Amino acid sequence: MKKIKIVTIGGGSSYTPELIEGFIKRRDELPIKELWLVDIEEGREKLEIVGAMAKRMVKAAGVDWEVKLTLDRREALKDADFVSTQFRVGLLPARIKDERIPLSHGIVGQETNGAGGMFKAFRTIPVILDIIDDMRELCPNAWLVNFTNPAGMITEAAINYGGWERTVGLCNVPINSIIKCAEVLQVPQTELFFKFAGLNHFHWHRVWDKQGNERTAELIEKMYNPELAQSDGKSEVANIKDIKFNYEQIKDSGILPCPYHRYYYATDDMLESELEEYKKNGTRAEVVKQTEAKLFELYKDPKLDYKPEQLTKRGGTHYSDAACELITSIYNDKRSEMVVSTKNKGAIEDLPYDAIVEISSIITSNGPQPINWGRFEPAARGMVQLMKGMEETTISAAVTGNYGRALHAFTINPLVPSGKIAKDLLNELLLAHKKHLPQFKDTIEKLEILEK
């Protein structure tokens, strides 16, 4: 079998040990020759720490893979078979701004939703397109596995603007939902069939058992009916508050929501909780920064050659393992069933054929083949179409640097008030992220003149 080369951009991430563990688990399925971890100068120290740990993990596993560290992306990409992306433009300080600045205006401040999520897209999309330019030259047949957030928008930019059809987006949220549903039904995950459909951080799902019985309504009762003892209403995601959904609303929808839907079904409650936490402990990003610092202290231990349990508290557990399974399934044409961001291809009738959606898919050597969902009922249909319009407008603004389009994206987003508040918030975030927004250079210069 041909030995393969896998490159991870953002290799200095605290998630990298989970990625290495995932590859080691699949050593009999993936004939890896080289694992390259790539980062930028600002991430050099973390890359060296986590890279040394990755080498220890590989050695302890007894596999003969070469683990290489570099700050030279082009060197790493040469002849790669798979490229995974897990980077954050501006590092955690940029995330802190994405959360603090909206909250200072009394608006939801969240990494992938609302104004913060849009600005993460503004910073990240030009970089993913640059990476694709390099890939086109250096590894034209490679698959791009993206779990850089906002994963759906980054994947859409890569495919529909970068023209890189061999791109698949990943998220850990569906995995957490699958685990939760199996626990509530007290049934092994392998005995349940799930169908997910929607957008990244904005999907719904249905569940069936092996006998062909749909269990969605039962799960709604057990998870969201306040009169039932087993209903805990807890979020499946560490970074989302356990604000309870409105049971009657979920029951009426007939489908199970994504944990992130709390931001749209219970906006005021989520905002109140965020503002309270912000005043008491700072933003979620600041908490993550502390957690990450502790993780890297652990990673420095020369005896540590396995993924520590503390990594599960980081908030993105299962991301990397999912990436490894996706790569394995493409390489071996395994036909694994996974929830990924990919082209709709008619699976969701309410969205364009070429739109990037998050959908249950069969993973083949030709990439994901989405499983048909059909139509949404009017309430969900209206919400998902609005959000897709917001995503498309955000991506276009990120590519063009069009200020009016960016303002339009803010206006469409349900978590951002329109009018003067939207404009003031947009301007403040543009100035705060100036270093990482070259496409908005002319607008930012005008704003700086007005500030003087």
Image (cartoon, rainbow, N blue to C red):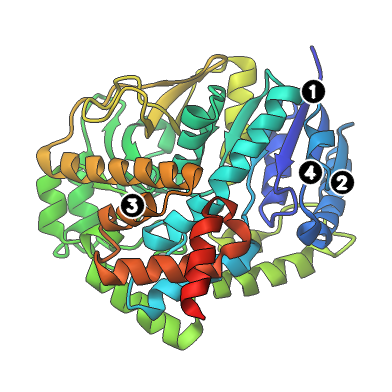
Q: Which of labels 1 and 4 is toward the front? A: 1
Between marks 2 and 3, how big is the CA–CA gap?
Answer: 44 Å
Quadrant of the drawing holding the N terminus = top right
**As drawn, is 83 to the left or to the right of 145?**
right
Q: Which of labels 4 and 3 is toward the front? A: 3
Q: Which of labels 4 and 2 is toward the front? A: 4
Residue visible at 53% across and 22% down in the picture: 165
Residue 79, disc: 1
- Is the residue marked by circle 4 packed among few (<14), some (14-19), or many (20+) residues within 10 Å? many
Place residue 85 in its image quadrant.
top right
Identity, as a three-letter code, of the amino acid under mark 3: Ala
Q: Which residue is mark 4?
A: 37
Identity, as a three-letter code, of the amino acid under mark 1: Asp
Q: Nearer the viewer, residue 209 or 328?
A: 328
> Can the viewer see residue 151 in this picture?
no
Mark 3 touches mark 1? (CB < 8 Å): no
> Can the viewer see residue 226 in this picture?
yes
Place residue 343 in its image quadrant.
top left
Q: Is residue 251 above or below residue 243?
A: above
User: Considering the numbered disc 2 on the image, is that residue within a helix, a strand or a loop?
Assistant: helix
Residue 55, disc: 2
Q: Nearer the viewer, residue 394 or 88?
A: 394
Identity, as a three-letter code, of the amino acid under mark 4: Leu
Q: Which residue is mark 3?
A: 409
